[in-house]
Amino acid sequence: MPDAHPMPRLLGLAAVLLATASAGAQTATVGQPAPAFELVDVKGKVVKLSDFKGKHVVLEWTNPGCPFVLKHYGSQNMQALQQDAKAKDVVWLGISSTAPGHGDYLAPGALAAQYQAWGATPTALLMDVSGKVGRSYGARTTPHMYVIDPKGMLVYAGGIDDKRSANADDVRTAKNFVRAALGESLAGKAVSTPTAPPYGCSIKYAG
């Protein structure tokens, strides 16, 4: 029988897809070396984490079909973070672990076109179709964010901010953990909030 009181589509998706830190065990550990990886980007180039030794690196797990990703790109929040990071010589790697065959999967060319249309400026946009890298980091949501320092140590892992919603208006009042972690690490300080619960859509891994 049809629902007599349907929720708006976007909010319904958000409610259904909201994922929390309770699912799965995380392999990557804050305060320990970040797991090494090698992936191919949307242009067909092989990219290794070791290519960026000596620099800060941000990892952003992403899926353009996710309302929570749309929140941060539609508000220009993620683009602003990327631009600020680039100005400080920070490497930004977007990673798609969405399995081919899933409805949210975009082939490299289509994925690149979407992020270009949004004005995104990651250093590289990487394809993790097997899900191996995502699983090695314990990535569970889109977005799920990580900050790696120049020594290769993981100094932040978790949600982008403290407003666990798909509402773009919440960006204005949110505490952005990624911005804070980068600022402190770049200043040579310990990251005051090294972990926070990730939130967003569950990553659609293969298998």
Image: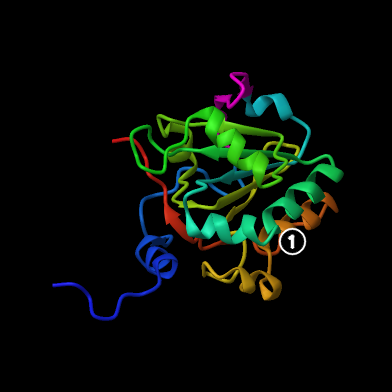
Q: Residue furthest top?
A: 45
Seen from the viewer's position, the closer of residues 90 and 5 is 5
**Residue shown at 31% from the left, 75% from the top:** 6
Amino acid type, callout 1: Ala
Pick the quarter of the image with the C terminus.
top left
**Residue shown at 70% from the left, 64% from the top:** 192
**Element class at badge 1:** helix
Residue 28: within the magenta? Answer: no
Query: Magenta stretch: dominant SS?
Result: loop
The colour scheme used to paint the residues is rainbow
Residue 8 sits in quarter: bottom left
Q: Is residue 30 above or below residue 55?
A: below
Seen from the viewer's position, the closer of residues 142 and 147 is 142
**Residue shown at 62% from the left, 24% from the top:** 48
- Bounds of the magenta segment: 33-47
Q: Is residue 73 above or below residue 173?
A: above
Q: Is residue 153 visible?
A: no
Q: Disc 1 marks which residue?
A: 180
Seen from the viewer's position, the closer of residues 179 and 149 is 179
Q: Is residue 135 visible?
A: yes
Q: Position of residue 10 (x, y in %)?
A: 44, 65
Residue 45 sits in quarter: top right
Q: Is residue 92 above or below residue 169?
A: above
Q: Position of residue 57 (x, y in %)?
A: 70, 40
Q: Position of residue 144 (x, y in %)?
A: 54, 52
Question: Would residue 184 appear left or right of 66 to someone viewing this image?
Answer: right
Q: Residue furthest left?
A: 1
Q: Position of residue 58 (x, y in %)?
A: 67, 44
